[in-house]
Image (tube, rainbow, N blue to C red):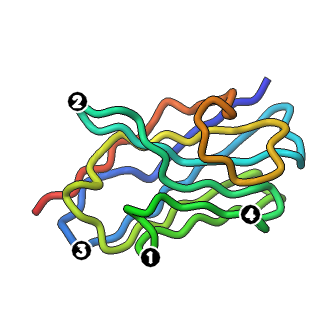
Amino acid sequence: QVQVAESGGGSVQAGGSLRLSCAASGRTFSDSAMGWFRQAPGKDREFVAAISWSGSSINYADSVKGRFTISRDSAKNVVYLQMNGLKPEDTAVYSCAYARGATWATRNPRDYGYWGQGTQVTVSS
């Protein structure tokens, strides 16, 4: 079993920054990926960013490219999502997920078997 827990959400004004953290614990393996997804009220869950264990594979949604940066500390099993230039449309519940057996930064939520509870990010205009 793998446990995933996010932290770092909050409220900021447009143009501001937040950093989300995600810790994976339990039976984690090096052949894995970790990703961030978000869901706004009334909308479907969407992919935000993902990173492979080694960090050699990284993917971003077009909507966040150039503003968000994903990174990981594999020794600590922690993934970070640095969010700069936040916009009101970034408001959502952000969830971290762990994909066991994924050797690249997959965008497909079906590849992720372990999910955190989510953390709220609210951006006001």
Q: Are marks 4 and 3 in contact (CB under 8 Å)?
A: no
Q: Residue 69, image x and y in percent?
A: 53, 69
Q: How many numbered tags mark residues here?
A: 4
Q: CA distance from mark 3 to mark 1?
A: 13 Å
Q: Give left or right: position of 68 versus 79.
A: left
At a point 80% along the width and 36% down the height, the residue shown is 100
Q: CA distance from mark 1 to mark 4?
A: 16 Å
| Element type at mark 1 | loop
At a point 73% along the width and 38% down the height, the residue shown is 99
Circle 2 residue: 42
Query: Callout 3: few (<14), some (14-19), or many (20+) C-alpha neighbours within 10 Å?
Result: some
**Mark with earlier residue (2, 4):** 2
At a point 22% along the width and 29% down the height, the residue shown is 42
Q: Nearer the viewer, residue 37 or 110?
A: 110
Q: CA distance from mark 2 to mark 4?
A: 31 Å
The amino acid type found where label 1 is placed reads Gly
Image position of 7 with respect to 113: above or below: below
Q: Are marks 3 and 1 in contact (CB under 8 Å)?
A: no
The amino acid type found where label 4 is placed reads Ser
Q: CA distance from mark 4 to mark 3?
A: 28 Å
Query: Callout 4: few (<14), some (14-19), or many (20+) C-alpha neighbours within 10 Å?
Result: some
Circle 3 residue: 15
Circle 1 residue: 66
The quarter of the picture where residue 75 lies is bottom right
Q: Give left or right: position of 30 versus 64.
A: right
Q: Nearer the viewer, mark 2 or mark 3?
A: 2
